[in-house]
Image: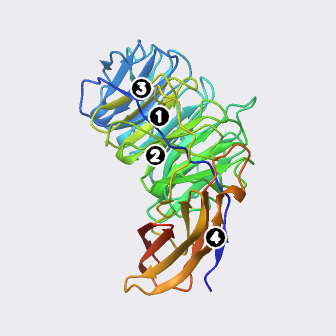
Amino acid sequence: MIRILVLFAIALPSFRAAGQGWVRQTSGTSNFFYSVYFTSPTSGWVVGQGGTILHTTNGGSTWTPQASGTTNFLYSIFFIDANTGWTVGQGGTILKTTNAGTTWTPQTSGVINYLYSVTFTDLNTGYIVGSEGLILRTSNGGEQWTSVPSGLTNTLSAVCFPISSASMVGYAVGGSASFGTIIKTIDRGASWFSLDAGTTNWLFGVYFTDLMTGWAVGFNGTIRATTDGGATWMPQASNTVERLVGVHFPTRTTGWAVGFAGTILKTENSGEEWRPQASGTTSNLWSVFFVDSLTGWAVGWNGTILHTRTGGTTDVAEETTPYTHVLYQNYPNPFNPVTTIGFRVQGSGRVTLKVYDVLGREVATLVDGIQDVARSAMAPGALTGYKSVVFDGSKLPSGVYFYRLNAGSVTQTKRMVLLR
């Protein structure tokens, strides 16, 4: 039996760009960048391919190379104060600075794993995650790093400890090509236990604004959010199938996610609605960092460094008129066996949304009736017209399917893949 469930409606604005919200900065290299971190609106670092470390003291107007002493790829950088920071990467590489990067000193990791993410809660206490489920912990600023069992063999891509009075609670995410992982510690990293991520998509980024509120992003435009410390993770609509890699929230309500093909998404309501922003690049973006709700940077492949002083928006206010009829790409895609299909209609009228197999045979009718936008169940102040339905293909064989929206004179069709 095919189950159909009409979900909630959200606001999806339209944009009219007359200025550039994100501006490319000159990095002086075509190396890939994987991480960016700022300690103030003027002082920041990016790290990446071939041991590259760049530093700016003027908000990115100029970037100056720093000697890392390694050619290994560096995947993550974190500073606990204006002078003290760590960067980690390929082959178990760990580097520390106590003078804002003037010199970087190697630390012994004791492993040859890929190290993908580093964070510290104070000058002494830090955590690193990496390939093959690796977790390293230090209590003396990295003089010694100790491996902690994670119970996993898949990659851990990112780690985050929301700062609290005791800094006991932390989260890490990762996965594989067919598995999404979220783990948690409540004893300062001494032990970790798995949470139900609610997705089979590999997760690459995680960020918490407090002990209870966080987001994870990953493959196929995946965004999961929690408000109960990870007990439940709810899907949020990204309206993209691009891989999302980095996520950062300077406030509890305002945040950004970045990913492949120059994807930048912004939310101003804790992820209830994610809006695309024009990045001006098709390079894959891996990391995003904001020092406040307006000033931020995003970095990625081909030496890409992007900067905004306007929260990524243009100098013309966003319009609040709704889209005309639009059919969105299903999420996730491929799926097994459930996927969500979103669509927007303007005005009232008959709407049909049907699913067909590759031979053109109808296999499901998801929507067939009058869609009255004026009576849509919307949040106060939200734009009307957006709805989504859940399609369950558990009774269908694996393969390619097409779904078609007919609304007024508009017909739109998109492709999806069921993998069983």
Image location (x, y in percent) of residue 246: 48, 41
Mark found first going from the N terminus, 4 or 1: 1
Mark found first going from the N terminus, 1 or 3: 1
Q: Amino acid at mark 2?
A: Val
The mark found on residue 370 in the picture is: 4
Query: What residue does disc 2 label?
Result: 245
Image location (x, y in percent) of residue 335: 49, 70
Query: What residue does disc 3 label?
Result: 307
Measured in 3D between alpha carbons, the distance from the residue under mark 4 to the one under mark 3, in whole angstroms, is 45 Å
Measured in 3D between alpha carbons, the distance from the residue under mark 2 to the one under mark 3, in whole angstroms, is 18 Å
| Viewer can see residue 139 | yes
The mark found on residue 209 in the picture is: none
Residue at 45 percent of width and 81 percent of height: 356
Residue at 42 percent of width and 45 percent of height: 259
Query: What residue does disc 1 label?
Result: 288
Mark found first going from the N terminus, 2 or 3: 2
